[in-house]
Image (cartoon, rainbow, N blue to C red):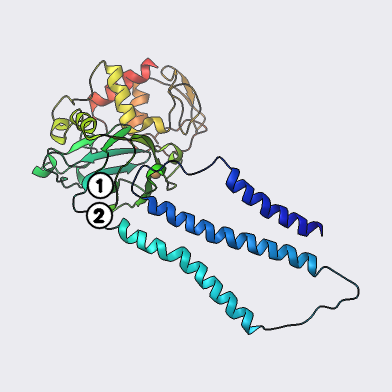
Amino acid sequence: MVLAIILVLLVIGSVLFHFLSPWYLTPIASNWGFIDDTLTITFIVCGFVFVVINLFLAYCVYRFRYSKDRRAEYEPENKRLEWWLTAFTTVGVVAMLAPGLFVWAKYVDVPEEASLVEAVGKQWSWSYRYPGEDGILGTVDVRHIDAKNPFGMNPDDPNGQDDVLVSGSEFHLPLGDPVKVLLRSKDVLHDFYVPQIRAKMDLVPGMITYFWFTPTLAGTYDVLCAELCGSGHYNMRSRMVLEDEADFRAWLATQPTFADTQTVQVATVSGSPEEQGRQIAESQGCMGCHSIDGSPGVGPTWKELAGRTEELADGSAVIVDDAYLVESIVAPNATIVAGYPPIMPAYQLDDAQLAALIAYLNSL
Ligand SMILES: [Cu+2]
């Protein structure tokens, strides 16, 4: 009897929790309402089965409870009941799966007029590339990746010269126009996910994956990595700004093209060496692992780092000077600070970038 009551309370509590809970889906910011619909269908089917099975269980626990005067009946087979259960389960599974197939067909069918943006993931930051005036993304190759060319742009491809490169913590898109998002990884599996647009897709090393969506609601949204990609995964974030066409154009015009980045002074990196260093740290994703306020992270904090004495994993100690900082950036696993795993990727920065970054580190 007690068990039956607990089961009934469990069902009532679950239904109440669903209707009274404040944790609902965020307002949708894309055309993918279909994805919410398939979620709702799955939820209704599973919720119905959950309620029915638990109430049936409660009934059986009560109805067939132990009694001295009653013997259990033996019924090894019931064809009629089996047919009913098979039919019922089939309808439920089809109701959950079939709508998803229709939505998937739309999801991989990109509209002709969609514009392009490429999101590039690496441990543990995002960067973005737009095709520029000609509407064509230049070709890329890992062999071209170096300090001055983090996107691996093919320098001989005329289509790539006007590509707009965004190595910051946010990118923008205009409202109302479909956009095809091309996804490229420079190292391991990642997943591009903005909860408000509902769509998401894996980045697979060695191939270009994609999805498309039409932005519908202005705002600034978090871009998350939704595929466990290493110890800094939780911090692999960026922002997506959806805004009207004019604001988008104005923002895009402030970003450097590939040709700009190949000239000596990069347009967006300006100001004092410390400020340049701060911009480099942000664009390279250093803040994914290193705090500047002393709080603990995947790697040592940068606050008051210069001049500090670090205890190393091999038991020795080192005073943090410029030479040690350079080594820690270009060959991070040569010496490891005690208590930290040897996981930092080596960074290819040129001398000017290194000098700016170290000026920034020394200023903290
Ligand atoms: Cu990731």
Point 49% across, 27% down: residue: 316
Residue occupying image coordinates x 58% and y 61% = 48
Number of marks in the image? 2
104 relative to 323, above or below: below
* Residue at 25% in and 26% down: 353
x then y, percent, for residue 224: 40, 41
337 in relation to 115, above or below: above
Where in the image, quadrant-wise, is ligand 1 located?
A: top left
Provide residue 280's location: percent of width, then percent of height: 29, 27
Secondary structure beneath dot 2 equals loop
Amino acid at pointer 2? Val
* Quadrant into which the N terminus falls: bottom right
- Mark identifier at residue 327: none
Q: Are marks 2 and 1 in contact (CB under 8 Å)?
A: yes
What label sits on residue 178 in the rendered view? Answer: 1
In the image, is 19 to the left or to the right of 179?
Answer: right
Dot 2: few (<14), some (14–19), or many (≥20) neighbours within 10 Å?
some
The picture places residue 193, in percent across and down from the top left corner, at 38, 45
Q: Nearer the viewer, residue 247 or 328?
A: 247
Question: Tag 1, which secondary structure?
Answer: loop
Give the residue at mark 2.
Answer: 110
Q: Residue at x 18, y 25 (%)?
A: 267
Q: Between marks 2 and 1, how big is the CA–CA gap?
A: 8 Å
Considering only vertical position in the picture, is 272 above or below 39?
above
Q: Earlier in the sequence, mark 2 or mark 1?
A: 2
Check disc 1 and give the amino acid type: Pro
Q: Position of residue 139 (x, y in %)?
A: 16, 47
